[in-house]
Image (cartoon, helix red, strand yellow):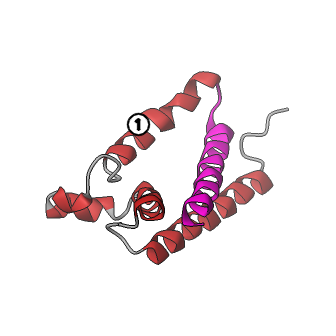
């Protein structure tokens, strides 16, 4: 149940992020800026390839600001039963991120940002 629900929550979160990225992109080439300069570093600091407990204390604190860390740990808990972060906290953080991005996307749509004639 945890793994399946995190798949859906992660998909919603990334879809909202992609939607906001598309609103701001003026050309097809600009769409790749966010994945290259934001998502790639977030992936490497998100504990995908290692436990964040192996990082120096400063980078551990930086990693705690990363929503990918919470997604990865919820997946890890769902599949392996072990996680660096409590699964309840991970779900709460992801839900807060989804609500924040959805609110921001609706605000941009209501404002008319990125809408072309």
x and y percent of residue 97 in the render?
55, 64
Residue 59 in which image quadrant:
bottom left
The magenta stretch spans residue 19? yes
Q: Residue furthest left?
A: 56
Q: Quadrant of the N terminus?
A: bottom right
Along the horizontal axis of the image, is 69 left or right of 6?
Answer: left
Q: Quadrant of the C terminus?
A: top right
The magenta stretch spans residue 20? yes
x 32%, y 53%: residue:
47
| Mark 1: secondary structure | helix
x and y percent of residue 101 in the render?
62, 59
x 56%, y 70%: residue:
96
x 62%, y 50%: residue:
11
Read off the residue under disc 1: 37
**Residue closest to the eye, 65 or 55:** 55
Question: What is the magenta segment's predominant secondary structure?
Answer: helix
Q: Which residues are magenta?
A: 1-27
**Residue closest to the eye, 43 or 110:** 43
Along the horizontal axis of the image, is 41 left or right of 25?
Answer: left
x 31%, y 50%: residue:
45
Residue 35 versus residue 84 in the image, above or below: above
x and y percent of residue 9 in the render?
61, 59
Residue 22 versus residue 48 in the image, above or below: above
Residue 110 versus residue 96 in the image, above or below: above
Residue 104 in which image quadrant:
bottom right
**Residue closest to the eye, 78 or 117:** 78
């Amino acid at each position: 149940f945890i793994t399946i629900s995190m798949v859906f929550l992660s998909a919603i979160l990334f879809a909202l992020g992609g939607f906001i990225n598309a609103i701001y992109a003026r050309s097809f080439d600009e769409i790749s800026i966010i994945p290259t300069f934001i998502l790639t570093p977030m992936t490497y600091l998100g504990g995908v390839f290692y436990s964040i407990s192996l990082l120096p204390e400063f980078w551990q604190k930086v990693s705690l600001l990363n929503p990918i860390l919470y997604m990865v740990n919820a997946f890890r808990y769902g599949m392996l039963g072990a996680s660096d972060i409590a699964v309840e906290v991970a779900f709460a953080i992801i839900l807060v991120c989804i609500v924040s991005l959805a609110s921001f996307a609706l605000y941009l749509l209501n404002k008319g940002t990125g809408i072309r004639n």
